Structures are given as C-alpha cells and as structure tokens.
Image: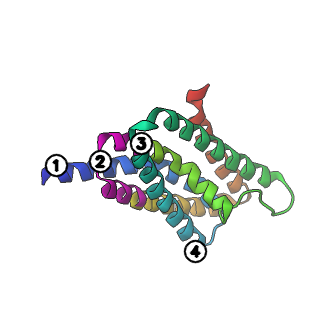
Amino acid sequence: MSEVVGEILTLVIMAFALGMDAFSVGLGMGMYKLPLRRIINIGLMIGLFHVWMPLVGLIAGKYLSEKFGTFATFIGGLLLILLGVQMVWSTFKKGDEKVITPIGFGLVLFALSVSLDSFSVGLSLGIYGAKTVMVILCFGIVAAMQTWAGLLLGRKVQSWIGTYSEALGGAILLGFGLKLLIPFW
C-alpha cells in the first residue's frame, strides 16, 4: 500500500514539474483576450496531449530514449519561439489577423509544444516500467489544471496592462522557448 502511495506521490510531483511549462505558456497565451470557453478547450487539449505524448513515450520505451528526448525538447523550443515571435509581432502590426491563434491547428501546435517534454519523460518511465494508466492520468489532469490556472491568470494580467499584454505574453513564450534551446548552443 505504501509503495502505491509513494508511486502516486512521485508521479504527481513529476506531473506538476512537467505541467509548469503549460502554466508558464498558458500565462503568456492567456493575454490573448481569450473567452472562457476557449480557455476550457485549451486546457482540455493540453491535458489530452499530456496523456497522449507520455503514452507514446512509454510505448517507445528504451529503444528511442536518447534520440527522441533531445529532439522533442528542441522541437518544443522552436514551436514556443514561433508562437512568441508571432504574438510580439502582431502587437506592433496594424490589423487583428494572427499567424497562429489558439484554435484549430494553432491550438494543436500550442499543445504539442508544451507536451513534448512529457514524451521524453514517458520514454524514461517506459524504461523504468511505471504503471501506464497512473502516469497518463496524473500527467493529463495536472497539465490541464495548470494550463487553466495560467490562462486565467494571464487573462487577468491582460486586463491590468492593456494593449501591450499580448507583447508581454509573446515575450514569455519566446523566453521559455529560448530556455529550452539553450542546451543546444
């Protein structure tokens, strides 16, 4: 019994650490003036990606661990930089059209960018032999909750700082993407 509780506690802590990027990116994306319904959809999508990505990682297990772990981090960093630059650029551009928005394909890119690290962790947990259902439930639920918290907080901050909130949100995404790419330089 205590082994199961210890494993669940470990997975929740790991899920919280992995979900911090979803919170940070949600904070930046929340400054888009998103309606509550879209915030709910974004959180659910990121939660689903935090279920799907470690599941794929668990299945791939020890065969692909080193190669895809580094690759996933690199791609995630590039996607976040792309989203961040687009948000900053659109602040200074006339007109309201966006290159990437958190709907449709833009939402998939957004969810993928914050979920790639959970793929890497899934690879490691696959080697370790962790219980698949517990891993994906913990990762998905925690990521969705942290995304909602970040998006709602970003929405509130946006109302405080006005016009330049989207640029601030873009800077947060850009900074987080650069942080992911620093080990590659």
**What predominant SS class does the magenta segment belong to?**
helix
Q: Which residue is mark 4?
A: 37
Q: Is residue 135 magenta?
A: yes
Magenta span of residues: 122-140
Q: Circle 1 sits on which residue?
A: 3
Q: Residues within 10 Å of mark 3 (few under 14, many from 20)?
A: many
Q: Which residue is mark 3?
A: 123
Comparing labels 2 and 1, the label whose residue is closer to the camera: 2
Labels 4, 3: front one: 3
The answer to whether the residue labelled 4 contacts the one labelled 1, judged by CB atoms less than 8 Å apart, is: no
Q: Position of residue 93 (x, y in %)?
A: 84, 54
Judge whether 177 appears above or below 46 on screen.
above
Q: Earlier in the sequence, mark 4 or mark 2?
A: 4
Observer-side mark, 4 or 1, equals 1
> Split into 4 quadrants, where in the image is the N terminus?
bottom left
Q: Secondary structure at mark 1?
A: helix
Disc 4 vs disc 2: Cβ atoms closer than 8 Å?
no
Q: Position of residue 9 (x, y in %)?
A: 26, 51
Q: Earlier in the sequence, mark 3 or mark 2?
A: 3
Report, in whole angstroms, how far the alpha carbon at label 3 lies from the one at label 2: 10 Å
Mark 2 vs 1: CB contact within 8 A: no
Question: Whole-Å distance between the Cαs marked 4 and 3?
Answer: 33 Å
Q: Nearer the viewer, residue 154 or 113?
A: 113
Which residue is more in the foreground, 174 or 82?
82
